[in-house]
């Protein structure tokens, strides 16, 4: 069943990303789709924060893929009963790239490694290389400050 959330400002969207981070076990590919300004990057910032990725969280617009190491303390891992095994997060903005660009960077190995989390904005553009178990998150602009965010299942 889909889970739908309405956020009323960018902080709420970040917070939602942060909360989702706590649900991740490692090896997930998260697909973020929705028009420009819908909140994909904002949500990613929360995810990165929640995963303990070391900043700064610059946009990967001019990079194909931005790689972060995560650092979740044992205390946090215990508190939320999450494992410490996520080691890297990859943030991809597929708006200007082709699936082949990712294949050239070792995509298959990256998505096969359970120590990694992969976040893809504009995943529609590379759908032919997405694993079928990828997590799909849809972003919709409702008004200037409201967004509908749907976790598809
Ligand atoms: N509820 C909200 N959630 C996310 N962003 C919001 C929200 N309300 C306003 N905004 C603004 O909308 C813009 C979203 O931009 P961004 O996250 O870069 O979108 P995308 O990556 O989908 O293009 C930001 O300027 C942000 O401040
Ligand atoms: Mg973006």
Image (cartoon, rainbow, N blue to C red):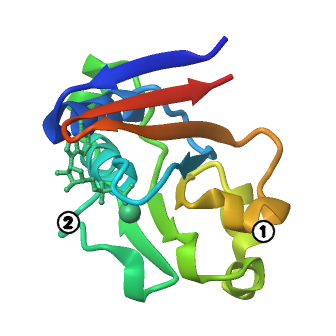
Q: Quadrant of the N terminus?
A: top right
How packed mark 2 is, by other alpha carbons closer than 10 Å (few <14, some 14-19, many 20 or more), is few
Image-quadrant location for residue 132: top right
Return the disc, 2 or 1, that comes first in the chain's sequence: 2
Name the one closer to the observer, 140 or 111.
140
Looking at the image, residue 2 lies above or below residue 110: above
Q: The residue tagged with tag 2: helix, strand or loop? A: loop
Q: Position of residue 57 (x, y in %)?
A: 24, 66
Residue 9 in view, yes or no: yes
Q: Measured from the top left, where is residue 35 in percent x and y? A: 47, 54
Query: Residue visible at 39% across and 77% down?
Result: 60
The C terminus lies in quadrant? top right
Residue positioned most to the top: 1
Q: CA distance from mark 2 to mark 1?
A: 25 Å
Q: Which mark is residue 76?
A: none
| Residue named by callout 2 | 55
Tell me what residue is drawn at x 21 percent, y 29 percent.
Answer: 75
Identify the image quadrant of residue 98: bottom right
Indicate left or right for 26 with 82 as reference.
Answer: right
Disc number at residue 108?
A: 1
Q: Using residue 36 as the reference point, say whether residue 29 is left or right of it.
A: right
Q: Is residue 102 above or below residue 132?
A: below
Q: Identify which residue is drawn at 18% across, 70% down.
A: 56
The answer to whether the beta carbon of the residue marked 1 is less than 8 Å from any atom of ligand 2 is no
In percent of width and height, residue 148 lies at 40, 29
């Amino acid at each position: 069943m889909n889970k739908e959330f309405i956020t009323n400002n960018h902080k709420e969207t970040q917070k939602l990303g942060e909360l989702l981070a706590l649900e991740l076990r490692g090896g997930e590919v998260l697909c973020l789709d929705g028009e420009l300004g819908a909140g994909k990057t904002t949500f990613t910032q929360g995810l990165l924060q929640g995963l303990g990725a070391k900043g700064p969280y610059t946009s990967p617009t001019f990079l194909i893929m931005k790689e972060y190491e995560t650092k979740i303390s044992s205390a946090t891992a215990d508190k939320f009963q999450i494992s410490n095994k996520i080691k890297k997060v990859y943030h991809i903005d597929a708006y200007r790239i082709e699936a082949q660009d990712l294949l050239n960077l070792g995509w298959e190995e990256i998505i096969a490694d359970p120590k990694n989390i992969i976040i893809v904005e504009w995943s529609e553009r590379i759908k032919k290389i997405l694993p079928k178990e990828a997590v799909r998150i849809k972003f919709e602009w409702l008004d200037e400050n409201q967004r509908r965010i749907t976790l598809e299942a």
